[in-house]
Image (cartoon, helix red, strand yellow):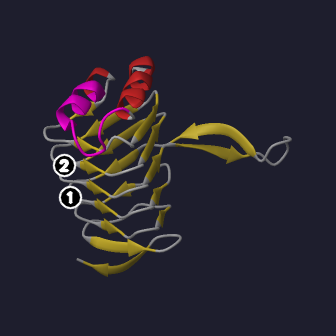
Amino acid sequence: MRPVMLYLTNIFFKLVPETRCFSLKALLLRLSGINLGKNVRVCSSVTILGSGRLSIGDDTWIGHQTLISTSSQIIIGKYVDIAPRVYIGTGTHEIDNFGKRSAGAGINKDIIIQDGVWLGANCILLPGVTIGEKSVVAAGALVTKDIPARVIVAGVPARIIRSI
């Protein structure tokens, strides 16, 4: 991504109506270096940070106040619905047993969200996870490991509650 252009895009987003001007927002995201499919709709309060790679597939919706932070790679498939206040982040730290801080060296792990996934409000995707095709992550769930295709997960940490 192009950090300076992305910074300006995030500022511009604050000036336009929340669920309007989707084509203009898509153009700015493409100019920021994001690989965007057709008919991607991003709400104006979404914040995208980082210098990693971000790819968003066709007909995807990204809801209010979602935070996407990438220092490696995030791939969001086609027909994905992301509800409000979702966090998707690729960065974390190793635990440092000997230094003054517990948060040691920074590490980055890719996140993959496959086609048709629905991420519920306030869910969190931690670094290194893959969400399988057509799966549903319930509101408030904390995803710490890979989720297979066509299941519903809920809880902290997220666990499979049923198959679809």
Instruction: For marks 2 and 1, give the CA distance.
Output: 6 Å
**Crowdedness of circle 2 by 10 Å Cα count: few (<14), some, many (20+)?**
many
Q: Position of residue 5 (x, y in %)?
A: 39, 19
Residue 84 in which image quadrant:
bottom left
Identify the magenta region. 15-29
Please tell me which residue lies in front, 107 or 88. Answer: 88
- Residue 1 visible here: no
Does the magenta run of residues contain 17? yes
Q: Position of residue 121 (x, y in %)?
A: 39, 63
Q: Position of residue 124 (x, y in %)?
A: 47, 58
Q: Amino acid at mark 1?
A: Gly
Mark 2 and mark 1 residues within 8 Å of each other at the beta carbon? yes
**Quarter of the image with the C terminus in it:** bottom left
Residue 132 in which image quadrant:
bottom left
Name the mark on residue 37. Answer: none
Name the mark on residue 116. Answer: 1
Question: Which residue does the numbered mark 2 point to in the structure image?
Answer: 78
Q: Residue at x 39, y 35 (%)?
A: 14
Q: Amino acid at mark 2?
A: Lys
